[in-house]
Structure formats: structure tokens, C-alpha cells
Image (cartoon, rainbow, N blue to C red):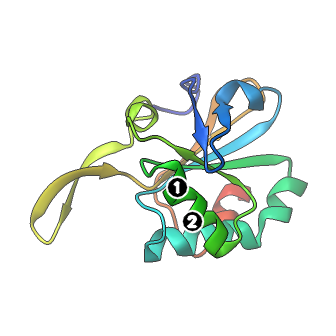
Amino acid sequence: MKTGDKAPSFISTDQDGKEISLEEFRGKKLAIYFYPKDDTPGCTEQACNLSDNYDALKKAGYELIGISVDDEKSHRKFADKFNLPFRLVADVDKKIVEDYGVWVEKNMYGKTYMGTARKTFIIDENGVISNIIEKVNTKEHTAQILG
């Protein structure tokens, strides 16, 4: 995926089991942030930064969703624990992460495995990717989106 590409369409469910799709954000600016796992240190830091600054994102005209391969129950627990005001999308079949090219080989302590790359896509009102944040700063992610 690159800037200028049409954002891949998706339909999934959020932490409440409600259907969510890219199409429902048509006509709005959308920040989709992909993250590795609910309730881990970096992912919590990132989600809390976005939550703390959610009003600023909304004021700037952004809708915000987080996507990981965790299930609805995990997302619900994570959202409740940190009082997250935005929707978390469950991508348990890994279709969305694969379509966006963020399901990648990772390496930790010399061991390779497949996982979700931390990356954010800014989608314009017409469904086109206007920016991709490749190097996410979990502590300052809102500033990166608004930047």
C-alpha cells in the first residue's frame, strides 16, 4: 500500500460485536491504526495517547479506529480497562492486516514469527490513502496524525 492508493474495503466487527466497514466512513477523514496486541505496553501507550487526545482528533475532523488480530472479547476488555472512546476492530481471520500489508515477518530475540506491524493509514473523504505513518511513536501518536 502507498499514498494515493484506494484504501482496501473491509467488513468486520468491533469490541461490541457490531458490524463495522470502511464504507461507513465515506465522506470523513479516517485514521486506521494497526497494532500488534491488546493490553501490551506499547499498544497500551499508543491507545492511551490516542484516547487522551481523542477530542483534538475529532475537532480536526478525524474518525479513528484501531485494528488488531485480537478477538472481540479481548478488544472489549482492553477498551474497558483503559476507557477507550473509539472502536477496535477484530481481524481474527487476518484478512484486513493482509489487505493493508501489515501482516509481516517479525523478529524478536532471534526468533522469527508473523505479526502485525504498527502502522497508521490516513484515509481521506474519498477513501484514498493520503498518508501512511510507518514509524509510529506510541507516546506521541496523535501529534503524528495531526502533524
Tell me if residue 102 comes above or below residue 39 in the rendering.
above
Q: Distance between the residues labelled 2 and 1?
A: 6 Å
Q: Nearer the viewer, residue 130 or 101?
A: 101
Q: Residues within 10 Å of mark 2 (few under 14, many from 20)?
A: some
Q: Name the residue under label 2.
A: 77
Q: Is residue 15 left or right of residue 1?
A: right
The structure residue drawn at horizontal position 71% and vertical position 59%, both measured from the top left corner, is 147
x, y percent for residue 119? 48, 51
- What amino acid type is highlighted by mark number 2? Lys
x, y percent for residue 8? 54, 25
Quadrant holding the N terminus: top left
Q: Mark 1 points at which residue?
A: 73
The structure residue drawn at horizontal position 59% and vertical position 38%, both measured from the top left corner, is 13
Q: Which label belongs to residue 38?
A: none
Q: Residues within 10 Å of mark 1 (few under 14, many from 20)?
A: some
The structure residue drawn at horizontal position 44% and vertical position 56%, both measured from the top left corner, is 118
Query: Pointers 2 and 1 in contact (CB under 8 A)?
Result: yes
- What amino acid type is highlighted by mark number 1? Lys
